[in-house]
Amino acid sequence: MVSILRIDKEGTWYADYNPIIHRKISKLFAENLQKDENGGFLVYLGNESMPVEVEETPFVVAEVVPED
């Protein structure tokens, strides 16, 4: 069982200090990341939630598409 989830300033996810290299798992966590009422971050999956340590900002711009 994972005891710590973390996102570094580059947007890399870690589980127990090991990088999560499976892109679909990182994407799943990112899609279910929410800010709580105290300003912290949690990942919600079904009825479960887990706190996430965020080094800086949890979002990384992956692509910019210009509008016409």
Image (spheres, helix red, strand yellow):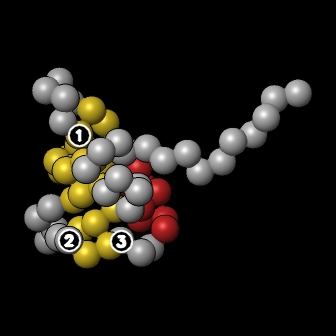
66 versus 60 height, above or below:
above
Q: Nearer the viewer, residue 60 or 29?
A: 60
- Which residue is label 3 attached to? 20
Q: Position of residue 26 (x, y in %)?
A: 41, 61
Q: Residue at x 55, y 45 (%)?
A: 61
Q: Earlier in the sequence, mark 2 or mark 1?
A: 2
Q: Position of residue 56 (x, y in %)?
A: 30, 45
Residue 25's image quarter? bottom left
Q: Residue at x 49, y 68 (%)?
A: 23
Local crowd size for mark 1, using a 10 Å CA cut-off: few (<14), some (14–19), many (≥20): some
- Which residue is label 1 attached to? 41
Q: Position of residue 55 (x, y in %)?
A: 25, 50
Of the residues tagged 2 and 1, which is closer to the observer? 2
Marks 1 and 3 sit apart, C-alpha to C-alpha, by 18 Å
Q: Earlier in the sequence, mark 1 or mark 3?
A: 3
In the displayed structure image, the side of residue 63 where residue 28 appears, left or right: left
Of the residues tagged 3 and 2, which is closer to the observer? 2
Q: Amino acid at mark 1?
A: Phe
Q: Residue at x 40, y 55 (%)?
A: 11
Tell me, yes or no, whether the two marked residues, 1 and 3, touch with CB atoms within 8 Å: no
Where disc 1 sits, the SS reads strand
Q: Amino acid at mark 3?
A: Ile
Marks 3 and 2 sit apart, C-alpha to C-alpha, by 9 Å
Tell me, yes or no, whether the two marked residues, 2 and 1, touch with CB atoms within 8 Å: no
Where disc 2 sits, the SS reads loop
Q: Amino acid at mark 2?
A: Tyr
Marks 2 and 1 sit apart, C-alpha to C-alpha, by 17 Å
Image quarter in which the C terminus is found: top right
66 versus 53 height, above or below:
above
Residue 17, labelled with which disc? 2
